[in-house]
Amino acid sequence: FTKYAKKYSDGKKAVEAELAELKKHCTVIRVLAHTQVKKLGFGVKKAHLMEIQVNGGTVAAKVDFAYSMFEKQVSVDAVFQPNEMIDTIAITKGFGVQGVVQRWGVTRLPRKTHRGLRKVACIG
């Protein structure tokens, strides 16, 4: 963060140049938003980060709207209506090269099994 703060502290000329490039070349505008974990009231320390697409109007209007919302709090009421359907996309945890017990939740085999306990034995 300190690198970016130093980069943009000397003036708004660099920021305005980047915004002009976005207005000129981009077709989809997305913003990064995060939660305020201090207000949750339990032991989460890292903020939940989400990428939100800005819809409606021209690309220039989207960029101006997104730039006007920088560093401001946005309440849930300002974004969503009651009983509104929401389309979400999520990323799974990703188990990598884990075994079948951890990855798929199959039952461990009995203690006296010959070639390993944490395997799939009889599929059916």
Image (cartoon, rainbow, N blue to C red):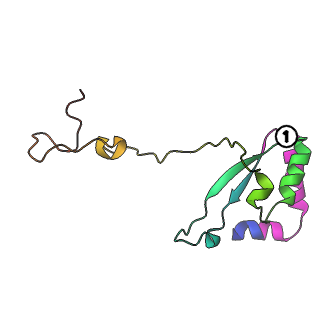
Q: Which quadrant of the view contains residue 46?
A: bottom right
Magenta residues, as a range?
Answer: 6-29
- In the displayed structure image, the side of residue 123 where residue 58 appears, left or right: right
Place of residue 74 in the rendered image (x, y in percent of width and height, measured from the top left): 77, 61
How many numbered marks does the figure carry? Answer: 1
Callout 1 secondary element: helix
Tell which of 50 and 105 is nearer to you. Answer: 105
Helix, strand or loop: magenta stretch: helix
Q: Residue furthest top?
A: 124
- In the displayed structure image, the side of residue 99 where residue 55 appears, left or right: right
Q: In which quarter of the image is the C terminus?
A: top left
Q: Which residue lies furthest to the front in this view?
A: 83
Residue at the image position 70 percent from the left and 42 percent from the top: 85
Residue at the image position 52 percent from the left and 71 percent from the top: 43
Tell which of 86 and 99 is nearer to you. Answer: 86
Residue at the image position 58 percent from the left and 72 percent from the top: 41
Residue under circle 1?
A: 25
- In the displayed structure image, the side of residue 77 where residue 112 appears, left or right: left
Place of residue 49 in the rendered image (x, y in percent of width and height, measured from the top left): 63, 57
Place of residue 9 in the rendered image (x, y in percent of width and height, measured from the top left): 83, 71
| Amino acid carrying mark 1 in the image | His
Query: Label 1: how many residues lie within 10 Å, few (<14), some (14-19) or many (20+)?
Result: few
Tell which of 87 and 26 is nearer to you. Answer: 87
Residue at the image position 24 percent from the left and 36 percent from the top: 120
Residue 82 counted in the magenta span: no
Tell which of 77 and 2 is nearer to you. Answer: 77
Place of residue 72 in the rendered image (x, y in percent of width and height, measured from the top left): 80, 65
Q: In which quarter of the image is the N terminus?
A: bottom right
- In the displayed structure image, the side of residue 72 where residue 44 appears, left or right: left
Residue 21 counted in the magenta span: yes
